[in-house]
Amino acid sequence: MSVRIGITGVAGRMGRTLVEAVAAADGVTLAAALERPDSSLIGADAGELAGLGKNGVAVSGALSEVIDSMDVLIDFTIPDATLANVALCAEHGVAMVIGTTGFTARQQQQIDDAAGRIAVCKASNFSTGVNLCFKLLDMAARVLGDDVDIEIIEAHHRHKIDAPSGTALSMGGVVANALGRDLAEVAIYGREGQTGARERETIGFATVRAGDVVGDHTVLFAADGERIEITHKASSRMSFGRGAVRAARWLATREPGLYDMQDVLGLKADRQ
């Protein structure tokens, strides 16, 4: 049976990509397309917005009006909008794929609570390649240990509103966990002036916002005499779109709980 998918923010760059990804995937159908209630695109055909031609799915301005038509909602918007959708999906038993980043600890707790009622897949990045990088970073950190300096450099387009990116923070979290460090205590978000010598246990973050960069991430492990760089570069948002649709299809048969892309890809030994 085809998994019925709803997509929020369909007029945006990622929203249009998700509509295209659903159209290209097997075993899924686009059941609903959503935009802000005040959008001038309410009533427009979602397929036409994505440049695919008409698909018969009209853009809606209220999740409550279409929620019963879907099995899974994919949400790549902003924290406040996502949380409102989480509450409604939990009430109606609709699973969620969440690609939104920038949540506060309190907001994350609301998602955790909802995951007690519905299946939620939340990830900072839905690219298969990035999630493989997470595994490589864990391995590299455990092998190299405290003998290297670790820096994370990320670049995105000029329109991205949060920094560092959720993916960069996730990469930092993977490395910190592997080394037994608390990222909140060792992260350095930019340097300026007379900062003094670098402390070995710190993990530095550098952020670039420019042009139309889809997403570049590099984790640098630097020792005396050698360095290792693990890099992922996204040239198209479709890599994220395909991953999100794959997660939605996987999530449709899962029990309530909070999952991530590592679960979807079978990269966790404790969840198969």
Image: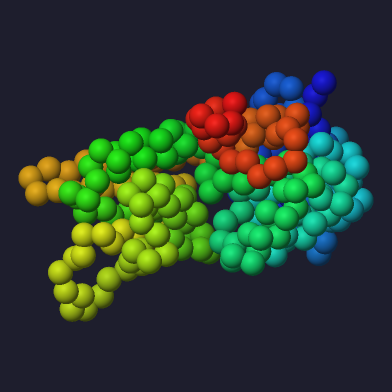
**Foreground residue among 146 and 24:** 146
**Foreground residue among 189 and 10:** 189
Residue at the (21%, 65%) spot, across then down: 199
Q: Seen from this angle, which residue lies furthest bottom?
A: 194
Image quadrant in which you'd find residue 169: bottom left
Q: How is the image coloured?
A: rainbow
Quarter of the picture containing the C terminus is top right
Residue 156 vs residue 31: left or right? left
Across and down, in percent, residue 209 comes to: 41, 60
Residue at the (59%, 31%) spot, across then down: 271
Image quadrant in which you'd find residue 23: top right
Across and down, in percent, residue 240 comes to: 55, 39
Residue 99 vs residue 88: left or right? left
Residue at the (42%, 64%) spot, across then down: 184
Residue at the (80%, 57%) spot, across then down: 87
Q: Seen from this angle, which residue lies furthest left?
A: 225
Quarter of the picture containing the N terminus is top right
Q: Looking at the image, can residue 202 be seen?
A: yes
Across and down, in percent, residue 259 comes to: 63, 41
Marks counted in the figure total: 0
Q: Looking at the image, can residue 47 be seen?
A: no
**Foreground residue among 61 and 272:** 272
Residue 78 vs residue 3: left or right? left
Across and down, in percent, residue 230 comes to: 30, 40
